[in-house]
Amino acid sequence: MKTSSPIHEIDIEKLTIRKAVIEDSPFVARCVLEAIGFENITDEILVRQTAFSQREDVLYSWRHALMAEYDGETIGCIIAYEGRRYQWLRSITFPIIKEMCGADFSGQRDETGPGEYYLDSLYVVPRYRNCGIGSQLMLSGIANACTLRIPRVGLIVSTEKPDAQKMYSRLGFRETERFIAFNEPFIKMTMELAQPPMLEVCAASLASARTAAKAGAPRIELCRRLDLGGLTPDRADILACVRELPLQTFVLIRPRGGNFCYSDEEFRTILDDIRFCRDNGAHGVVVGFLTPDGDIDVGKSRIAVETAGTMPVTFHRAFDRCRNWRKGLEEIIACGYSRILTSGQQPTAIQGIETLKQIQEQANGRIAILAGSGVNSGNIAEIIRQAGVSEVHGSCKIAGYESDEEEIRKCLSLQKHFIEI
């Protein structure tokens, strides 16, 4: 990092915010150390922190970082992640911190949780401070939360940093509480994000995916064989959607029809498919696991989420075969899923609308509820309004199994204006 005289003004239009890559790990490592006020950063400490930042399963990984570049120089970063993963990430990160520097934070309260996008460590190279870089990194983090449809953004700030508090307030954050973290007094600040209704198109082929993109759908669930309830699509189709279409591609991972109790061999296939999606740019995956008794298979469910890394994971309509949905909902949230696709345990969403409302109420913003099955232009507004959900899922087909462009457009129009319908 350069140590020359301070920059007093920059052309913000020339600032670039990008996702970090593994080569950014040394910068991320130093940023974390300096952001927490670590003194005497030796080469040995920096090497250890860099190795820490290269891991996939820790809070301070490069995988959770956004980088700021200006005039060919990396000048800042922000580490941010989904609160739904916090418990798992914390269970791995905190023991490593204790081993590295002897600090034991195992007894402190959680900083974040499900339903929140957490902005953890913000750092700007000293000579570029007070130029608006920090605000731009924060805005990029907020934009990520909007893309992921997470209803709240949170952070904590030291009571000894009034300038930072003012910046966060200007961006729209409000103080919610005060507490002790890392042995110091902190302020928790949050920002609530409105979540307008959104349609996810169930695309059973590459042709349907392209139809959805042409109609303006923001997200698809890519699959095949709807006659079997949906199976994992061909990898070539996954790659085509990710590389060619201007929408989010969530991929159904289901190796066969029938029940949701998978053998060890089937589960290995599922995990391999999740890794393929993760490593090739898919925006999310859709999976679900039950025990023979009709409970959530927590072990397999948690491993699937861990394998997905930073990808959001949807628990599919296996949920509708769960014998105790209230218990199952809490288990799915605890496993770190981002949403549940459900028809309210009925054949169609319109039939299950009362249960959908109860599911939405119990979820209380901690996980998104995606209402699906039988959703069409004739009932989409009623489902959104009565169940209180902000996401709906439908194949938008008129005949056969292919999505229809005009039906998608009707659904998109109605879900935008459902309040007046």
Image (spheres, rainbow, N blue to C red):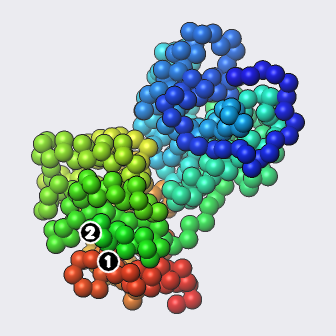
Residue on which disc 2 sits: 204
* 2 or 1: tag closer to the N-terminus: 2
Residues at circles 2 and 1 in contact by the CB criterion of under 8 Å: yes
Where residue 286 appears, as percent x and y from the top left, is 32, 56
The residue type indicated by label 2 comes to Ala
Q: Is residue 337 left or right of residue 192?
A: left
Residue drawn at x 24%, y 42% as measured from the top left: 272
For numbered disc 2, what is the local secondary structure?
loop
Report which residue position mark 1 lands on. Answer: 403
Image-based side of 80 in relation to 215, left or right: right
- Residue drawn where x is 30% and y is 70% of the image: 207
Question: Which quadrant, please, contains the N terminus?
Answer: top right
SS for tag 1?
loop
Q: How far is disc 2 from disc 1 in space, using C-alphas?
A: 8 Å
Residue 134: x and y in percent read: 73, 41
Please identify the quarter of the rendering in which residue 157 is found: top right
